[in-house]
Amino acid sequence: MYANDGFRELDRQECGRRLVQVPMGRIVYTRQALPAVLPVTFCLDSDGAVLVRTSASSELVSAIDGAVVAFEADEVDAATHSGWSVLVTGAANLVTDPAEHARLLRTGPRSWVAAPREVFVRIDPELVTGRELLGGHTPHGVRLPS
């Protein structure tokens, strides 16, 4: 993709490669008619869907099941002013199929906070965008060697 003003757009395939590098992201949804952002652990399914594991009694589940949400993950290096960000937008749905739930218990994301009953939410990637910040400078403005 092209570079512009210190940024480079990432194609969908590169976005997927970046997402598997980090364990946490942020889900953006609507709560009581206002935007809300919540950090979550996640993983990508084999088809590129974002999988989130959370408590079945979580306010998040009722707020996003069947809704269009955004999911963002990134990695930033403050010392070199570089990094990347990926945004996935799509419909979020609670995984209700027992066989699929069992598969995700084995292969899906791990929760950092245990809950008595956990569920999986699947975000189907309808729109995937990303960009890389091409910093390369120290905090004092000195260009780092390539």
Image: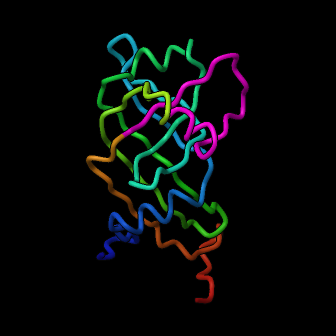
Q: Is residue 10 magenta?
A: no
Judged from this view, the residue extending furthest toward the bottom is 146
For the residue pair 46 and 140, the one nearer the viewer reads as 46
Q: Residue at 44% of width from left, 66% of height from top?
A: 132
Q: Is residue 105 magenta?
A: yes
Q: Residue at 34% of width from left, 70% of height from top?
A: 5
- The stretch of residues the image draws in magenta is 101-123
Judged from this view, the residue extending furthest toward the front is 99
User: Residue 139 at what x, y percent from top left?
Assistant: 65, 67
For the residue pair 64 and 146, the one nearer the viewer reads as 64
The colour mode here is: rainbow
Q: Quadrant of residue 117?
A: top right
Q: Is residue 21 above or below residue 59?
A: below
Quick one: quadrant of the C terminus? bottom right
For the residue pair 52 and 79, the one nearer the viewer reads as 52
Q: How many marks?
A: 0
Q: Quadrant of residue 57?
A: top right
User: Residue 34 at what x, y percent from top left?
Assistant: 36, 17
Q: Quadrant of residue 21?
A: bottom right
Q: Is residue 20 above or below residue 58?
A: below
User: Residue 58 at what x, y percent from top left?
Assistant: 55, 15
- Tell me: 61 left or right of 58: left
Q: Residue at 30% of width from left, 25% of height from top?
A: 67
Quick one: quadrant of the N terminus? bottom left
Q: Residue at 71% of width from left, 34% of height from top?
A: 112
User: Residue 74 at what x, y percent from top left?
Assistant: 52, 53
